Image: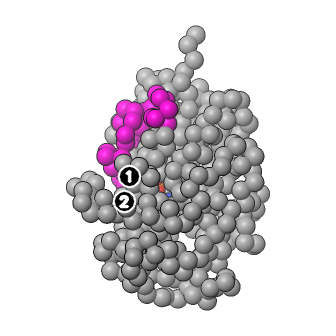
């Protein structure tokens, strides 16, 4: 019997999923993208068949898994805005947790063998030390993080009870855009620092709000581990290869293992931009840890993954270049 080799990418029209689709497409993988366009864009999908639909639609998902002979699912589809998850938690449990359960049910029924899940450093909440390792306690402090952690647990339990094997990637702060400039982060009303700073740099926003300047960090602002989206995409490619080579189910941090403060990011944006952006300092925001950096030994060892774009200036440059491109030709217009 012929081996199934189709790859389903849910949320492949979104920021991170579209960068993964690009890399897998360039390698000649048989791709099908399922996206409901709640935050994604048709223009972002450069390879594969694009199906408009929802991960909660059991009949549709089952049909796709059968028609495309899917043997691997990369599951990006989710809502991702932390403050919104606080004000509207059921939206997050519904889309991120319940619909992931639905997808897993379809995957189990179709005999899908490989599953790669987009999780988040938010499952750690506020870690005790500066580094979060994969065995640090799970203590999410918002419904977004909890909705993702519950999905991790379902996946873990299903893998234990079936032939499914999985890689859970816990992303830290994803930033930057495709170095070739074909696709990029186009999220509306973004809340992540580098994207927002790049929007200020090109005049799309008036100013950048900095939350907290009195943290116990070298310059008083929060420190985060920023990973370029193309390096993260490469980690997915390697995770797929790992599973196909018989790798065991595993949970891995995806970051660079060192951090930058908000002020360092702003300085870099100013340098790349050639002039300073407007900044307004605000008090600390509830629930923001002073420092959140990934321990990365496990991902290097397990996947043989090594970053290529571990350079803040490069990350910022690709972000600002993409904002300029969006100004000329907006997506979803
Ligand atoms: N951006 C980050 O820094 C970051 C950090 C940690 C984890 N993540 C995770 O990575 C994944 C991708 O995030 P992103 O930043 O690319 O977000 P995004 O909003 O750009 O992408 C999500 C995509 O999923 C689609 N979608 C949402 N719900 C769907 C559903 N029920 N059915 C079909 N399509 C649906 C959206 O239209 C969008 O295209 C998410 O699971 C997110 O939780 C992101």
Chain part drawn in magenta: 24-50
Residue at (28%, 54%) from the top-left corner? 331
* Contact (Cβ within 8 Å) of mark 2 with mark 1: yes
Q: Secondary structure at mark 1?
A: loop
Q: Could you say which is closer to the camera, residue 17 or residue 78?
A: 17
Q: Percent from the top left, x then y, of residue 92? A: 49, 58
Distance from Cα at disc 2 to Cα at disc 1: 7 Å
Query: With respect to residue 168, does 120 lie above or below?
Result: below
Q: Could you say which is closer to the camera, residue 138 or residue 59?
A: 138
Q: Quadrant of the C terminus?
A: bottom left
Q: Percent from the top left, x then y, of residue 239? A: 63, 40
Residue at (36%, 48%) from the top-left corner? 182
Q: Secondary structure at mark 2?
A: helix
Question: Is 9 colored magenta in this rendering?
Answer: no
Q: Which residue is mark 1?
A: 181
Answer with left or right where residue 178 lies relative to residue 331. right
Residue at (47%, 59%) from the top-left corner? 176
Determine the image quadrant of residue 158.
top right
Other-residue count near label 1 (Cα within 10 Å), few / some / many at <14 / 14–19 / ≥20: few
Answer with left or right where residue 160 lies relative to residue 2. right
Answer with left or right where residue 235 lies relative to residue 52. right
Q: Which residue is mark 2?
A: 322
Question: Is 47 colored magenta in this rendering?
Answer: yes
Determine the image quadrant of residue 170.
bottom right
């Amino acid at each position: 019997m012929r081996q199934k080799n189709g790859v389903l990418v849910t949320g492949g029209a979104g920021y991170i999923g579209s960068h993964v689709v690009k890399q897998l497409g360039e390698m000649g993988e048989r791709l099908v993208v399922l996206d409901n366009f709640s935050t994604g864009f048709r223009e972002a999908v450069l390879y594969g068949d694009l199906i408009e639909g929802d991960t909660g639609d059991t009949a549709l998902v089952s049909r796709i898994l059968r028609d495309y002979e899917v043997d691997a699912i990369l599951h990006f589809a989710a809502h991702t805005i932390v403050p919104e998850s606080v004000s509207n938690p059921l939206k997050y449990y519904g889309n991120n947790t319940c619909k992931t359960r639905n997808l897993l049910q379809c995957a189990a029924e179709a005999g899908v063998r490989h599953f790669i899940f987009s999780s988040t450093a938010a499952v750690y909440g506020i870690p005790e030390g500066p580094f979060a390792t994969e065995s640090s306690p799970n203590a999410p402090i918002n419904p977004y993080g909890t909705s993702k952690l519950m999905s991790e647990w379902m996946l873990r339990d299903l893998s234990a009870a079936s032939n499914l094997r999985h890689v859970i990637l816990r992303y830290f702060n994803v930033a930057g855009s495709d170095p070739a400039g074909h696709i990029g982060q186009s999220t509306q009303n973004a809340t992540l620092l580098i994207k927002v700073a790049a929007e200020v740099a090109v005049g799309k926003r008036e100013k950048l709000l900095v939350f907290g300047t009195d943290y116990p960090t070298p310059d008083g602002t929060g420190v985060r581990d920023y990973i370029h989206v193309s390096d993260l995409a490469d980690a997915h490619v390697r995770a797929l290869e790992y599973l196909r080579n018989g790798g065991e189910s595993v949970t891995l941090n995806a970051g660079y293992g060192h951090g930058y403060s908000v002020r360092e990011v702003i300085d870099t944006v100013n340098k790349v931009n050639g002039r300073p952006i407007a900044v307004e300092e605000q008090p600390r925001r509830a629930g923001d840890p002073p420092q959140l950096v990934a321990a990365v030994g496990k991902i290097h060892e397990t996947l043989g993954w090594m970053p290529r774009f571990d350079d803040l200036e490069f990350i910022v440059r690709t972000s600002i270049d993409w904002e300029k491109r969006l100004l000329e030709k907006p997506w979803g217009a």
